[in-house]
Image (tube, rainbow, N blue to C red):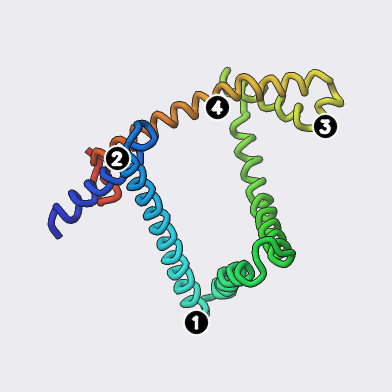
Amino acid sequence: MSQLVKRSIPIMITFIVGFFTILVYFLAVPSSVTEASANLNRGATMIVALAVGYGTIVLLRTHTRRVIQRRKGEWVYSIVAIVGVFTFPLLYLSVGPNSYLYKTFFNTVNATIGASIYGLVLFTLVGAMYRMFRATNFNGLLLLVAGVLVMLQVAPIGEAIWSGFPIIGSWLINYPTLGAYRGIMITSAFGALAIGFRVLLGYEGGHVSRREE
């Protein structure tokens, strides 16, 4: 396949689509350009829907193969996955998302699985917190003190020990933590903007199997 088809055309399509999509947010453009941008967004929605459909087909094919081959330790879970893939859409189409049956089935399954996963991850989080809160230097000491104060602000035992713990914890959350969070978000926004321009200009070629320049 030629260089034009493999790289140049995909990069040109990316630039045109990104340019029209961004243009309507920053400039007063004619209605035709706005309509073209809306059509491109609708096209992107259709592509996402097709990708989800294709992913579902691949998922069903993979798990069906496991069930047919009776893979040890896998095929039972594959049956559960296949049943789940068909159950929710059928309930959605038959009784609707606001029905008692759909909400009960969804909340029961989803809440139970979520609680189980959170319970398993909790032990890893505790270990990570222990390693993170070790005061090996001054920065670690600050992190340890701030973490303990915030936990005492959330836990009822903190207010029972001293009424000032909730005040200090709330101050840490509302001022230093919020300021650091906003700084991180602003930095991330600039980084995302830079990556977006690199993609539009063709310097980020991961989507066309191209190394960065």
Reply above or below: 167 against 93: above
Residue at the outermost front position: 31
Looking at the picture, how far across and down is residue 164, in whole percent? 80, 18
Give the residue type at disc 1. Ile
- Name the residue carrying label 4: 181
Q: Looking at the picture, tell me which residue is in the foreground, 17 or 210.
A: 17
User: What type is the residue that disc 3 sits on?
Assistant: Pro
Task: Give the image location of residue 51, x and y in percent.
Answer: 41, 61
Residue 206 in the image: x percent, y percent?
29, 47
Residue 45: image quadrant is bottom left
Residue 68 circle label: 1
Residue topped by disc 3: 156
Q: Is residue 73 visible?
A: no
Label 1: state its secondary structure.
helix
Q: Amino acid at mark 4?
A: Tyr
Cα separation between marks 2 and 3: 53 Å
Q: Earlier in the sequence, mark 2 or mark 3?
A: 2
Q: Earlier in the sequence, mark 4 or mark 1?
A: 1
Q: Which of pointers 1 and 3 lies earlier in the amino acid sequence?
A: 1
